[in-house]
Amino acid sequence: MTWFNKQSRLVQIILLLIPFVNWVVEIIVRWSTYMKKGGTVRLVVSIIVTFFGLVFGWVDLVWVLLFKKLLLQ
């Protein structure tokens, strides 16, 4: 998560724009956040991203454009 947040906004948008890369980034970021911080909401989001990561990634792309952070972070 910290690696993703340290990237420039342009790099974040590019990572979330490319479909397969989007899914991989979502999985890595969500599961690493869950492992570090725990929590039921983070677990549910991590499971959803594992199976529906492409859709959730597009939502995160818009969220990063608007608010400069991932949804439910």
Image: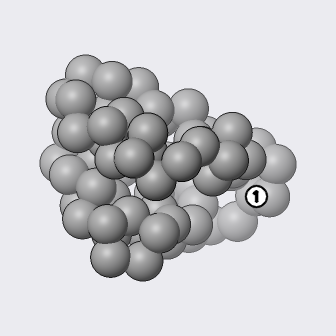
Q: Is 22 on the left-hand or right-hand side of 39?
A: left
Q: Secondary structure at mark 1?
A: loop
Amino acid type, residue under disc 1 in the picture: Gly
| Residue at x 32% of width, y 58% of height | 60
Residue at the (33%, 24%) spot, across then down: 21
Marks counted in the figure total: 1
Give the residue displayed 69% in from the left and 39% down from the top: 3
Task: Please tell me whether residue 45 is drawn above or below residue 53 in the rendered image.
Answer: below
- 8 above or below 21? below
Q: Nearer the viewer, residue 72 or 14?
A: 14
Asked whether the viewer can see residue 1, the reply is no
x then y, percent, for residue 7: 59, 43
Q: Position of residue 41 (x, y in %)?
A: 56, 69
- Give the x, y percent position of residue 32: 68, 39
Which part of the image, by quadrant, shows the C terminus? bottom right
Q: Depth check: 61 or 33 in front? A: 61
Residue furthest right in the image: 36
Using residue 38 as the reference point, say whether residue 23 is left or right of it: left
| Residue under the image location 50 percent in, 66 percent down | 69
Query: In the figure, residue 24 lies in which quadrant?
Result: top left
Kindly tell me whether residue 17 is visible in this rendering. Answer: yes
Q: In this image, 31 relative to 59: left or right?
A: right
Residue farthest to the bottom, as pictured:
67
Label 1 environment density (alpha carbons within 10 Å; few <14, some 14–19, many ≥20): few
Residue on which the image places disc 1: 38
The coloring applied to the image is: one colour
In terms of depth relative to the viewer, which is nearer, 54 or 17? 17
